[in-house]
């Protein structure tokens, strides 16, 4: 198995993809809007991927946060709110905010599990900072570390209740970035003491099954390399200081924060300590190059993958989606509108 997550080009596997994926045997896949039409189509696609690899617990992930980051959209699927609304409710009623975040995540998970998606890139544990890039903005769960951790835990547990594995992101914290890492490389110059608040939610939720790195330079820890490419940050901060021992994937290698060929970057993030490289765009040339560059997945990384995928119970009785949405909306009434 290759330590990589690949994207797909369209709504069905092409003949070339089918042959390549069967041979390369990636650890998993990520879906985007280009891969999604309706429930029967998505279910057929994910079933096809599982059949191709013979793995019922295949990692098939998506970015379904709610708000402006939603790959599965209305009118086929419900609309979900951004993280900031739970932060606002927390000001009024903390316990209601936690319950609403749990119900919302549980509902998201039901919509994903129904179509065979097993992993969601949620929750964001980035602590929002004044003056930072709006790429985080209303996606975050707040500016106070304890609150972010409390709401993040509710999201993880809500997803798990619906049979979906959550990913804490963006480790070790994207909240101070002044620019969008999709467009350029952010450099955070805060000192190690100030960065303790950024680490705090990740430390609290260090037992999360999966995590995703940030394409951000933290000069206090490694002035030369972004976290995704830094063994000092991955080993010394994420693994040791935070204490995270779950499956760690890079953020998307195609983001303009990183420079270099996609295959070289995939090899570099794995060499730095990521369990998996994330390559989202489904370009065959890049994927072939990645498969050639990467080693086989290590035994430790495979164990982390298996442990993460086994961390939730799939199947069994689930509450109706409409009930979860109604519960969430009733709890959010004080801050709705």
Image (spheres, rainbow, N blue to C red):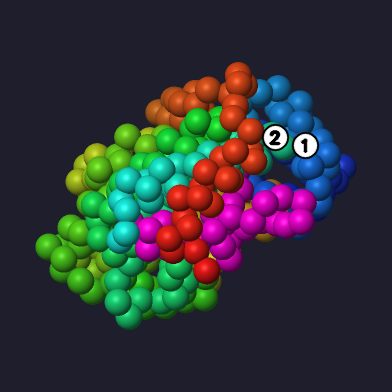
The part of the image, by quadrant, that contains residue 27 is top right
Q: Which residues fall within the magenta stretch?
A: 61-90
Among all residues in the image, which is located at the extreme right?
15
Q: What whole-number distance in Å separates the C-alpha atoms at marks 2 and 1?
A: 8 Å
Give percent across and percent down for residue 47.
76, 31
In this figure, which residue is indicated by the disc labeled 1? 43
Picture quadrant of residue 205? top left
Q: Which mark is residue 77?
A: none
Q: Residue at x 44, y 75 (%)?
A: 134
Of label 2 and label 1, which has the lower sequence position? 1
User: Which residue appears at 31% of the width and 51% of the height?
Assistant: 94
Q: Nearer the viewer, mark 2 or mark 1?
A: 2
The residue positioned 72% from the left and 29% from the top of the image is: 50
Q: Is residue 298 above or below residue 274?
A: above
On screen, residue 326 versus residue 299, left or right, reads right
**Residue denoted by label 2:** 114
Residue 244 location (% of width, % of height): 30, 39
Whether tag 2 and tag 1 are in contact, CB under 8 A, the answer is yes
Q: Residue furthest left?
A: 193
Local secondary structure at mark 2: helix
Instruction: Specify whether residue 83 is in view.
Output: no
Answer above or below: position of 289 versus 193.
above
Residue 128 spot, x, y in % from top left? 33, 67
242 displayed left or right of 139: left
Q: Nearer the viewer, residue 18 or 106?
A: 106
From the image, which quarter does the N terminus lie in?
top right
């Amino acid at each position: 198995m290759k330590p990589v997550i690949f994207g797909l080009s369209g709504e069905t596997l092409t003949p070339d993809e089918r042959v390549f994926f069967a041979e390369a045997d990636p650890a998993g896949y990520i879906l985007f809007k280009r891969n999604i039409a309706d429930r029967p189509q998505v279910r057929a696609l994910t079933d096809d991927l599982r059949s191709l690899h013979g793995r019922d617990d295949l990692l098939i992930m998506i970015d379904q946060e709610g708000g402006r980051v939603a790959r599965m959209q209305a009118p086929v699927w419900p609309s979900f709110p951004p993280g900031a609304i739970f932060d606002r409710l927390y000001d009024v009623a903390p316990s209601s905010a936690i319950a609403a975040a749990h119900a919302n995540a549980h509902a998201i998970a039901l919509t994903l599990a129904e179509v065979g998606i097993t992993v969601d890139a949620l929750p964001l544990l980035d602590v929002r900072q004044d003056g930072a890039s709006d790429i985080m903005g209303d996606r975050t769960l707040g500016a106070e570390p304890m609150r972010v951790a409390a709401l993040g835990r509710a999201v993880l547990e809500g997803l798990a209740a619906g049979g979906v594995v959550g990913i804490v992101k963006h480790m070790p914290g994207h909240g101070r970035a002044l620019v969008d890492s999709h467009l350029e490389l952010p450099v955070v110059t805060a000192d190690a003491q100030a960065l303790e608040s950024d680490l705090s939610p990740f430390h609290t939720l260090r037992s999360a099954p999966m995590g995703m790195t940030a394409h951000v330079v933290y000069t206090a820890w490694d002035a030369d390399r972004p976290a995704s490419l830094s063994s000092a940050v991955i080993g010394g901060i994420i693994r040791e200081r935070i204490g995270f021992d779950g499956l760690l994937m890079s953020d998307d290698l195609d983001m303009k924060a990183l420079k270099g060929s996609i295959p070289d970057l995939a090899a570099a993030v794995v060499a730095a300590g990521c369990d998996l490289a994330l390559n989202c765009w489904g370009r065959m040339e890049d994927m072939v190059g990645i498969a050639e560059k990467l080693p086989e997945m290590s035994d430790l990384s495979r164990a982390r993958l298996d442990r993460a995928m086994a961390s939730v119970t799939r199947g069994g009785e689930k509450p109706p989606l409409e009930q979860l949405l109604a519960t969430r909306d009733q709890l959010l009434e004080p801050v709705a509108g």
